[in-house]
Image (cartoon, rainbow, N blue to C red):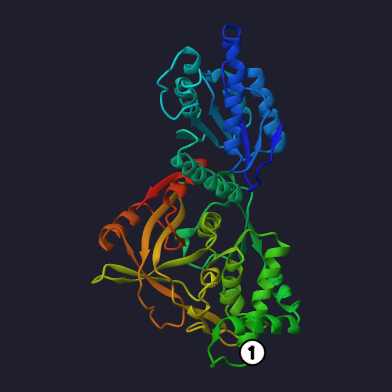
Amino acid sequence: MISQTKKVGIKIGYMPLAHKSYWEYFPKHEKPAVDLANKLRGYLSQFGTVYETGRLIDSAKRAAEARLLFQKEDVDVIVLGTVTYSTPDDIILDLKRFIRPTVVWNTQKSSKIPADLNFDKWMFEHGITGVPGITNLLEREEMPYFLISGHLGSESVKESFLKVLKAVSAFKRAWGSKLGMIGHLYPGMIDFGYDPTMMYTTFGASTAPIMESAVIKAYNSIEEEEAAALAGVLERKYKKAEDFEGKEFTNSVRTALALKKLVKENELDAVTVYCQSIWQRPDIGVVPCVGMSLLMQEGVFCSCEGDVPTTLAGLIMESLSGKAFFTEIWCNDFENDQFMMGHSGTMNLGLFEEKRENVKMVRHPWWTGCCGRGACLEVKMPPGKGTMLSIVQVKGRDWRMIVSSVEVVDRDPVPLGAPNFFVKLEKPIKQYLEELASLGAAHHFSMSYGDWTEHIKSVAKLFRVEYSFV
C-alpha cells in the first residue's frame, strides 16, 4: 500500500507500532489502533511519499513484510510511530537487515491526558512505554536514529520533522555523489589532504579525476557563436569592467561552457578546480572564475585548489541551503573583532538573482595567464546570519565536521577586484582561532546564509562522524 498525497523527494517507510498479544485479550482495540495509525500516516504524507504495508507492525512477521517493501522501494528514512505499546524485538532485526536513518516518533492520540481517561482510552495514550526499549537497542547497535516527541498538532513536531528530513536529503545527496577534481591538489596545501578510500566508505562520495586533456577537448569543442551568446547574456545581466584585453572575456566564457560540459558528461555533483592548470595553458590561458560562479548558480558547488573535502562540505551545504559558496579567512580586523573573508574570484551568482547590481565582472586582479587574466567577480555581499562548514580527516580514518555561526556584517568590501566580505563571530578572534586550531581545521570553508548548525549536527549523526561547533 502506498500513499502519494504529496511528493517532495523523500521516501518515508512508515511502521505504526503495536503489540499483537493485546488483540487476543482486547480485540475491540485493534480497529481504533488502525485508525490512529492511518491518522499518523496522513500527517507524514505532507513531508514526502509514504510507503507502508497497510498493517499494524505488531509482530516480527509484520516487521519483515514492511522491511521487504522498504527494500523494494529503497526508502530514505524509516519512521516508527507509537500507536500503542510495542516491544523492540518485533522490529530490531529488520531494522538491522535494512539500515536507514530512523525516526522514533513518540506520540499518542491526545495532546494531553484526557479528563475521562479509562483503560480503553489509555491504550492509545501510552505508546511511550515502548520507546526506551527501541532507543536502547538502537543505541547499543550504534544505529543512526532521531527521537521526535510531540503530538501531530504541535508546530514543534513539524519543525523537527522538517529539520531531520532536510538532513536526510543532504545525506542522500552526498551518498553516492561524484566529486570532480580538475587538476590536482595545490602544491603544499596538505592541510586538506585526505584518503579517498575513507571518504568513499564514510560519506559514499567518490573522487573523479578530470584530466587536463579533457578540459582542453571540452574547451575546443565550444563554438564561437555559443560563447558569444553567453557573453551577451552575462553583459546584459551584470556590470562589466571596460579594461578587458584581447580575448580575455571571450576565453573566460568559453571556459565556463567547457566546465559545464565536463560536469554534465562526467555526471559530477560538485567540482574542485586547480586553476593554474587552466590559465597556464596556451589554448585557454585565463582563470575559470566565471565558469565556477555560474556552476554554483546552477547548484553545482565549486571549490578551488583541489580541495575535495571542502567540496564535499559544499555539496552538503548546497543541499541544505540551495546557495552555498567557497571561502577562507583572509585578514584579521582586530579592532572591530571581525574577519575579512574571500577567495580568488568566484562567488555563487545565485545569491544575487534579486540584486544583480551588486555584481560586477572584472579582470582578475593578480593571476596573469597565457592569454591574459580573464574575468572574475566583484560583489557586495548581503548582511545576515551564516554558517560555515569544514570537513577534515583526523586521526587516520576518522572525520570531523567543524561548524561555525557567523554574522555577515553590513560593510563595504575592500576594492581588491575579487569577492570579499566581513564576518563577526559569536566569540573573540583569539578564542575562535584557538578552538579552531585545536580541532585541526583546514584553511578553507564552505558557507551558506542561514542557521544550519542543527541540520549539520543531524547530518554528522547520519554519517557517524564527529560534529564540533566552534
Quadrant assignment, res 251: bottom right
Q: Is residue 392 left or right of residue 165?
A: left
Which residue is at the front of the view, 45 or 341? 45
Classify mark 1: helix, strand or loop.
loop
Whether residue 186 is visible: yes
In the rendered image, residue 170, in percent from the top left (x then y), is placed at 56, 50
As displayed, is residue 454 above or below residue 132?
A: below
Q: Would you identify the image quadrant in which residue 59 lies?
A: top right
Name of the residue lying farthest toward the top: 25
User: Dot 1 corresponds to which residue?
Assistant: 247
Residue at 46% x, 76% y: name it: 419
Residue 300: image x %, image y %?
60, 63
Residue with the most extreme left position: 335
Determine whether, in the image, residue 214 is placed left or right of residue 110: right
Q: Position of residue 157 (x, y in %)?
A: 47, 39
Residue 151 at x, y = what percent?
47, 33
Using the image, determine if residue 371 lies above or below residue 431.
below
362 in relation to 70, above or below: below
